Image (cartoon, coloured by chain):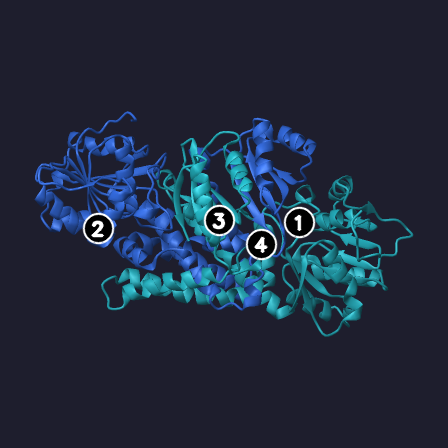
Chain colours: A blue, B cyan
Amino acid sequence: MAERRLNEQVRIVGSGLLGASIGLGLRQHGVDVILDDASPSSLRLAVDYGAGRVSAETDSPALIVVCVPPDVTATVVARELANFPEALVTDVASVKTAPLNELRALGADLSRYLGTHPMAGRERGGPIAARADLFLGRPWVIAGHDDITYRRAGAIEDMILDLGAVPVEMAVEDHDAAVALVSHVPQVVASLMAARLGDGKNGALALAGQGVRDVTRIAASDPALWVQILAANAIPVANILRDFRTDLDAVIDALEHPVASGSRRGIADTIAAGNDGVARLPGKHGQDRRFSQLVVKIDDRPGELARLLTDIGEVDINMEDLRLEHSPGAQIGLAEISVLPEVEERLARELDARGWKIAGAYA
Amino acid sequence: MAERRLNEQVRIVGSGLLGASIGLGLRQHGVDVILDDASPSSLRLAVDYGAGRVSAETDSPALIVVCVPPDVTATVVARELANFPEALVTDVASVKTAPLNELRALGADLSRYLGTHPMAGRERGGPIAARADLFLGRPWVIAGHDDITYRRAGAIEDMILDLGAVPVEMAVEDHDAAVALVSHVPQVVASLMAARLGDGKNGALALAGQGVRDVTRIAASDPALWVQILAANAIPVANILRDFRTDLDAVIDALEHPVASGSRRGIADTIAAGNDGVARLPGKHGQDRRFSQLVVKIDDRPGELARLLTDIGEVDINMEDLRLEHSPGAQIGLAEISVLPEVEERLARELDARGWKIAGAYA
């Protein structure tokens, strides 16, 4: 049993991906976890998965974690605050201003409520996708407001630390502006781009490479969930989308008048601004560190990639990242291996000596 | 020495990523490759890399491949057609209508010119990123027009096949519309999204997950090159961007009036249209086949992933794709393994028996 900070009984309302994952993680620390869900079959599944137990008459949870869709978060939090007048209540919805305002309007006891948002998740939801380590090393925002005291909120930070996440304190408005920028607007942009592919001829789509795949990957997300998220964070999202549109208008205008003075300059400035923006994203392990890449040719048959990685492991070099490139229609692929710059040359030498074909190397 | 179709002397003008990679690939087949470049240092580097030799008085190339930036492609093609009156000339620029029109205006001999476009490349350019297998299994568009006979063009198809690529015949206009959709517009969209990140607070960017990283990855591309590409394909790109803007306007409008009738429905329709669009992208091996995914927990230390893949290889299951997920700040990762649906259950059982922790499975 791992060490733990949280000793109180925890009640989790909503046993989807986040609720079940929190339950699984806390159970690993031996916390007494009570699960509840409006859907009896979801609840049974999460209990079967070991995410907690069903409630009993004698339960007296000190901490309640509401893990329900954004649309109903405030209603459920208010109900839990009323039903458990001693308990501290939090939620994990991906927007924070709207539920807080709603709770205020409902006259809920905000001295016992503090919203949070774990920056974790998958495209697929449900208890079946749950895992105890979903939050490991991820930022988990605690969205502060003025009606709760610092001391009263301690159990929430304890839970976050027990789950291996990194607590990050932010005002509700700052949180909502931040997720609008790094999550909600990228979702809208990816969906709008992917929607354009619906018009394309099959022959055009056959030319698709890794670029358009990456840009549109998250467009596979659930419409029902995203409508709730976007509607609940409408103002910050719309603000950024309007700025995006201003830049888009300028690009369209430049493309419509390609010989006009300054039109090429304007397009170049847009691409350059994108260079600067993408460079601001923190790298793996939260560092801004850049890795070197080696591209190695691998045959597309069982065991080839394993053999390559075994060779890398045997020379005791840690692979920082791995990316596979597939050639459509071909039976070979390329593995792009990221390593620390100082070991790249040695790795290339070792792989070459073992008969691997290095197709490229760059820093 | 590999078998080859192309027996003639080939002259490559421009020794950047594409020119040097074509040279390297043809040299592997023993083709006599002559390199030329306006930059003596680039030329020397490409020759040192083994991409070909410098020109000699007695050279008489049967095929000339122009690999220079889009802006100067037509001028260089016209010059080569004039200097080598017996040679067939092609180019590899990523737009095809503009150079053809320009050549026509210049009165060039179009009976010896046929443009092409290999769907290959990297974010990094230059001869140093070149590799002989850059084109392996990739589509390589041959952009047909009516001034060249079928028989005259044979050497171009031979070269494409020798380089391991897949020749795809398309009319110039269809090509330009296709790359606008699957390459140029995604680039603009990624750059516009990444440009927004420039305004974000550091705290906001620290919350960035894999989604925004994927959407903005190609925003790291070279502004000077992209200005040329976008300007040369301005009309098809602007057409798609205007449709994108129409959808964007609707989303902004819905977000500005979240309680208006139909506003949530409109947002849901946009996300759903994105679902449909992204599903149209052909999968690996050009198939539309969907795979099942198993998510397996791996420690972030040398050899762990190799051990996993060795185990997968030993049970003789072919991995269709592999994706690594890193937890920022954590020393563990998750490997998402794509396999054919019919073997997923067996793989899960085999991995479980070997002590691997399956963190999730979905189709």
- The residue tagged with tag 4: helix, strand or loop? helix
Q: Which residue is mark 3?
A: B338
Amino acid type, callout 1: Leu
- The residue tagged with tag 2: helix, strand or loop? helix
Q: Are marks 4 and 2 in contact (CB under 8 Å)?
A: no
Q: Are marks 4 and 3 in contact (CB under 8 Å)?
A: no
Please report whichever mark, 1 or 4, sits nearer to the chain's N-terminal start.
1
Q: Chain of mark 3?
A: B
The x, y position of residue B242, in whole percent, is 46, 66
**Left or right: where does residue A192 sit relative to residue B146?**
left
**Residue B140 quadrant:** bottom right
Disc 1/disc 2 C-alpha distance (Å) = 50 Å
Q: Which residue is mark 4?
A: B226
Tell me what residue is drawn at x 61 percent, y 70 percent.
B173
Neighbourhood count class around disc 1 (C-alpha, 10 Å): few under 14, some 14–19, many 20 upward: many
Foreground of the two, B58 or A29? A29
